[in-house]
Amino acid sequence: ASSSSAEAKATATTTFLPDGTDGPLRTMYGAVWSTSSSNAAPGTSTADSAYGSGALPLHTDMTYLRDPPGVQIFAMGRPSKHGGASVFGDGLAASESLRRDHPDAFDVLCRTVRRYRCVDDDGGWHLEAEGPVIRAADRGGGAPFPPHRSHRHRHHHRRWGPVGMIRHNDLDRLPDLPPADVRSIVDEREREMRIAEFYSDLDHAHELWDGLLGSDDIRLRMDLRPGDMVAVANQRCFHGRESFTADADSPRSVMGCYVSQDELNSRFRRAGYRVF
């Protein structure tokens, strides 16, 4: 079947629960979407870098939502003739590697709240959310962090527990701001020192994080064929894409949909798994 006919059939979604309350999560991109903008459903957004042909670095999707989707399902409709390989990465493995080898950087990415935004003027959307790159169980109960670097290493092994979520997409990230308690320090010299320290620590942590994401230890490269499908745990795993050459006669087309984390957790519980 042609890619366009397959996309048309996919709009009639199938559910599993008797009352049909489950199924794809509807977002600004619709319920079932296609990265070929010519085949996008009327009224849905195409304000995303996925609709271009450039390379996409490893990222998680919809970081600008308060609760990003739990699962993203990709189905290759038509691959590019030149380039466009899919790349996936294990965010949990990257986090644990950072915790083990660079505990200071792990701490910075756990406690620094970063902001994300998506604006689509044509579609009428303005979405913003915030959260740390690595969301780990806070055994310190959110207690204020020691003000000086020399004191911090004493707290790493006690404060952060298991990693529960990754939120990472540099393409949607807004400029970082120091915490409010730092910005409100009355003493100007102390305030400027702490702000400079904040940006220095964050830049270093981000550089180490990017280095891990570029490592083959956590990456999987796949050339998807027509009909291949991949399900990605969006709050744990990254996905990306190599650049490709656009062909008007045979454009690269990937279809997909999202499932909420709540629905995913519900399925796990119904199957007898314990959800943390």
Image (cartoon, rainbow, N blue to C red):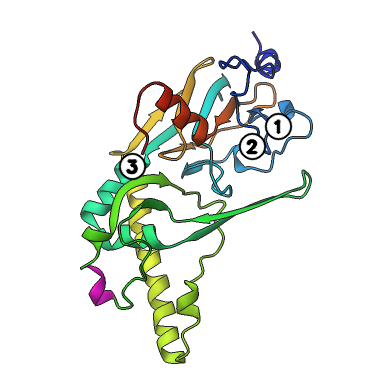
Q: Does the magenta stretch include residue 59?
A: no
Which corner quadrant holds the C terminus? top left
Question: Identity of the amino acid at label 1?
Answer: Ser
Residue 37's disc number: 1
Which corner quadrant holds the N terminus? top right
Q: Give the range drawn in magenta.
A: 149-153
Residue 92's disc number: 3
Which SS does the magenta portion mostly show?
A: helix
| Front label number (1 vs 3) | 3
| Front label number (2 vs 3) | 3
Q: Residue, x 48% and y 42% (percent of image)?
A: 60
> Which residue is labeled 2 in the image?
51
Q: Does the magenta stretch include residue 151?
A: yes
Given contact means CB atoms under 8 Å apart, are the residues at marks 1 and 3 in contact? no
Instruction: Locate residue 44 relative to residue 269 in the image: left or right.
Output: right
Cα distance in 3D space between marks 1 and 3: 32 Å
The local secondary structure at tag 1 comes to: helix
Where's residue 67, x and y in %?
54, 44
Where's residue 210, x and y in %?
38, 52
Residue 62's disc number: none
Q: Residue, x 56% and y 43% (percent of image)?
A: 62
Question: Identity of the amino acid at label 2?
Answer: Tyr
Cα distance in 3D space between marks 2 and 3: 27 Å
Q: Residue, x 44% and y 84% (percent of image)?
A: 192
Q: Is residue 59 above or below residue 251?
A: below
